[in-house]
Amino acid sequence: MLTALFSLALLGTISAEPAPGQSAAPTPQTAATPLAADWRPIPDDDVLVMTLAGDRRVVIRLAPAAAPVHIANIRTLARAHWWDRTSVYRVQDNYVAQWGDATETKALPTGVVANPPAEYGMSAPKLAAELTRADPYARQIGFTADGWPVARGSWLDQGAEAWLPHCYGMVGVGRDMAPSTGSGAELYAVIGHGPRHLDRNIALVGRVIEGIEYLSALPRGTGDLGFYKTEAERTPILSIRLASDMPATERPRFDYRAADNPRFAAYVRDRENRQPPFFTVPAGGADICNVPPQVRRRP
């Protein structure tokens, strides 16, 4: 059985920039409107660019603080061009799209750790912005200064461990049964309602920040757990590269919206209490997966 069997990405991609060919709609100035200084560059080494057949590009922001060994593996795999001519071989409705070597025969490059530590949590980071209410999976939810959604403190224990939550667009590592942790060669992106029950059971390594539609709109697999039954159904991967390894003229550059300021806190409050005229009943809180971190292509 594929190593992906027991794998299924912080949330759908939210961009402050209009899609190519579209005009930006005027944005009213509010307390939640970011200043220019609130946008900070994502390092090119933390940007992974996947090109699918049909000139479709999916861009992933990596989260090295959450899973450093897995991220080191992913960078090694990308620099070795390991994913070239592999495929998206599993698309399960309301769950995940998964990619890698469907044949399970491709050798890993030298230097890749086959089973890294179980990087399912991290030492508790300081939260720059918090949501008003906790959720069923954590006692505390919020955002780190660099814009990552974070949950902390299980209801089953009093530990201070924190983790990235499984929200739409988050990217994780496929693995076999524990103690397998997955090398990072098999990855998936969440394309449905956030499967938060997977939190702290699988390593999350990043989030799709552009092109999630090229994964979420793929035909669903009709095999068990959404695996495609035939090779012809799979979507070929032409390449996966770190932005830092791409020519400067082709390199996509992105900014994240920092959370360490009152404007982001106001953004969180706005998401917790949607305003009239459309909304007439405020919720008084929000699921962490309904407060998407914001990313834009660099102007």
Image (spheres, grey):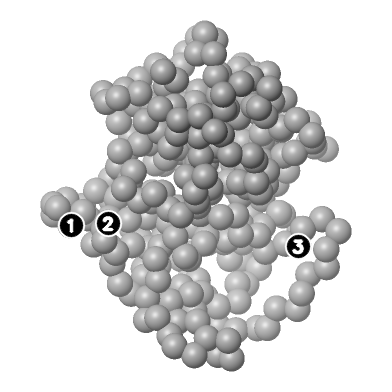
* Residue 39 in picture, x, y percent from top left: 61, 61
Amino acid marked by disc 2: Tyr
Question: What residue is drawn where x is 50% and y is 13%?
Answer: 104
Amino acid marked by disc 1: Trp
Q: Is residue 221 left or right of residue 164?
A: right
* Residue 186 in picture, x, y percent from top left: 49, 26
Q: Is residue 1 left or right of residue 180?
A: right
**Which residue lies most toward the left here?**
157
- Residue 180 position (above or below residue 123): above
- Residue 44 position (above or below residue 154): above
User: Do callouts 1 and 2 mark residues in contact (Cβ within 8 Å)?
Assistant: yes
The quarter of the rendered structure image containing the C terminus is: bottom right
The answer to whether residue 245 is visible is: no
Residue located beneath label 3 in the image? 18
Amino acid marked by disc 3: Pro
**Disc 1 from disc 3: Cα separation:** 40 Å
Depth check: give the residue in front, 185 or 124: 185
**Which residue lies most toward the right here?**
21
Residue located beneath label 1 in the image? 155
**Disc 1 from disc 2: Cα separation:** 7 Å
Within 10 Å of disc 1 (Cα), the crowding (few <14, some 14-19, many 20+) is few
